[in-house]
Image (cartoon, rainbow, N blue to C red):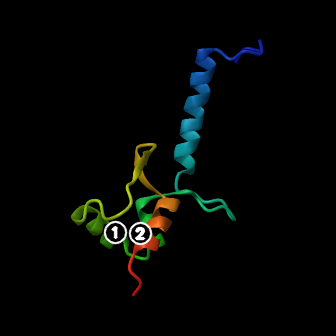
Amino acid sequence: MKNTGHATQEDVKRLENKISVLDRKLAGKSVPGIEPALLSARETAAYIGMSYGAFRTLKSTKPGYLPPAVIRNGCLVWRRTDLDRWISTLPKE
C-alpha cells in the first residue's frame, strides 16, 4: 500500500484476498468462550444430537425438513439461530 492515506482498488483487492484466506483457515475453528454463529454439517449434526451419517441421510431424504443452509466460502453452513428456532418447533418426546 502506498502511504498516501488513500487505498487504491488494488490495495482493497489485496486485503480482500488476505481476509478470504484467513476466513478459510479459521473456518470450523472455535475461539474459547465464543460460540460460532455458523456451523458446518458435522457441527450441525452434533449440535442437534445425531451422527453425521444420519444428518446427511436426513438432509438428502427429507428436503426442507431441516433449516436452510447458507453457502460460506464455498461450504454449506447452518445458522445456530435457525437451528435453535427449528429445535424449538420439534415435538417433545
- Place of residue 12 in the rendered image (x, y in percent of width and height, measured from the top left): 61, 22
* Residue projecting furthest to the top: 4
35 left or right, relative to 40? right
**Residue found 26% across the figure and 60% down from its top:** 63
- Mark 2, secondary structure of its residue: helix
**Residue found 41% across the figure and 49% down from its top:** 70
Q: Which residue is mark 2?
A: 45
- Place of residue 93 in the rendered image (x, y in percent of width and height, measured from the top left): 39, 87
What is the three-letter code of the residue carrying label 2? Ala
> In the picture, which quadrant includes the N terminus?
top right
34 or 10: which is nearer to us?
Answer: 34
The answer to whether residue 71 is above or below residue 85 is: above
Mark 1: few, some, or many residues within 10 Å (few <14, many ≥20)?
some
Q: CA distance from mark 1 to mark 2?
A: 6 Å
What is the three-letter code of the residue carrying label 1? Phe
Mark 2: few, some, or many residues within 10 Å (few <14, many ≥20)?
some
Tell me where residue 14 sits by quadrant: top right
Q: Which residue is mark 1?
A: 55
- Mark 1, secondary structure of its residue: helix
Tell me where residue 56 sits by quadrant: bottom left
45 left or right, relative to 61? right
The answer to whether residue 67 is above or below residue 90 is: above
